[in-house]
């Protein structure tokens, strides 16, 4: 095998393997513009090394699974919480002004990329299905009124124990006054019957380590139901 000399370093004339440049010139994620070509297409000269403040980090791509969070040290000694896997979060029910921690069942829609739905990736503004049980329990305790599947014939016995239990006159009058406002969107009531609610993630799991969001209602719910039917 013949050897050639370049800048005083002996090199082989053997052709480089395919994709070997990945090993020779490793590239990190960088947010600077010095490495990019100019508007005319000319390659810029490298006149300084990379800087720490120009770095970029790999996406978290948070998946559904048992909770696993990595702590990332950031500029100024601050911290980010990179969620690798999450299976629950706090979700608010806007029309009732309550929030409950509940289980995330599945990712069903993402406006940016269908691949994120197929892989079950949790990102901000992803549409997910959550367990309706904590919200159903609160509603029936607060209004003493069945919701969703609880209106069926098979739930009569359960209702008599939980919903129609003995209460003081003061509590009973309070509940009767609440029932005047106990109105649920039919589309939402139908979801309670299935035990799953559509919700939107409003937090950033890769930054805060949490998958929190809100239950879809009204026109926003109707919009995403149309999208899911396509």
Image (cartoon, rainbow, N blue to C red):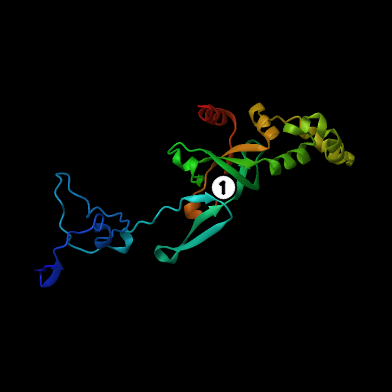
Q: Is residue 190 visible?
A: yes
Q: Is residue 209 visible?
A: no
Above or below, comparing residue 74 to residue 171 in the picture:
below
Quarter of the figure with residue 159: top right
Q: Position of residue 122 (x, y in %)?
A: 51, 46
- Residue at the front extreme? 1
Q: Residue at x 33, y 59 (%)?
A: 55
What residue is shown with label 1?
212
Q: Residue at x 64, y 28 (%)?
A: 187
Quarter of the figure with residue 113: top left
Q: Position of residue 138 (x, y in %)?
A: 73, 42
Quarter of the figure with residue 171: top right
User: Quick one: quadrant of the N terminus?
Assistant: bottom left
Q: Position of residue 169 (x, y in %)?
A: 89, 39
Above or below, comparing residue 41 to residue 83 in the picture:
above
- Residue at the bottom extreme? 8
Q: Position of residue 112 (x, y in %)?
A: 43, 38
Q: Nearer the viewer, residue 170 or 86?
A: 86
Q: Nearer the viewer, residue 79 or 18?
A: 18
Above or below, comparing residue 228 to residue 129 in the picture:
above
């Amino acid at each position: 095998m013949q050897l050639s000399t370049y800048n005083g370093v002996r090199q082989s004339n053997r052709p480089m393997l395919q994709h070997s440049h990945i090993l020779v010139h490793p590239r990190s994620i960088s947010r600077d513009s010095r490495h990019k070509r100019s508007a005319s297409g000319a390659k810029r000269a490298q006149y300084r090394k990379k800087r720490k403040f120009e770095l970029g980090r790999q996406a978290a791509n948070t998946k559904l699974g048992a909770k696993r969070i990595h702590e990332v040290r950031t500029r100024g000694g601050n911290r980010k919480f990179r969620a690798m896997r999450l299976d629950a979060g706090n979700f608010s029910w806007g029309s009732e002004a309550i929030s409950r921690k509940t289980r995330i069942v599945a990712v069903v829609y993402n406006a940016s990329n269908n691949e994120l739905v197929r892989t079950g990736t949790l990102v901000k503004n992803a549409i997910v299905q959550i367990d309706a049980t904590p919200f159903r329990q609160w509603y029936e305790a607060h209004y003493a009124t069945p919701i969703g599947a609880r209106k069926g014939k098979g739930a009569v016995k359960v209702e008599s124990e939980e919903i129609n239990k003995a209460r003081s006159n003061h509590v009973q009058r309070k509940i009767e006054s609440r029932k005047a406002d106990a109105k649920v969107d039919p589309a939402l009531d139908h979801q309670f019957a299935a035990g799953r609610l559509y919700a939107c993630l409003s937090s950033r799991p890769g930054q805060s380590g949490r998958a929190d969001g809100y239950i879809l209602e009204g026109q926003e719910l109707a919009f995403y139901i149309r999208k899911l039917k396509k």
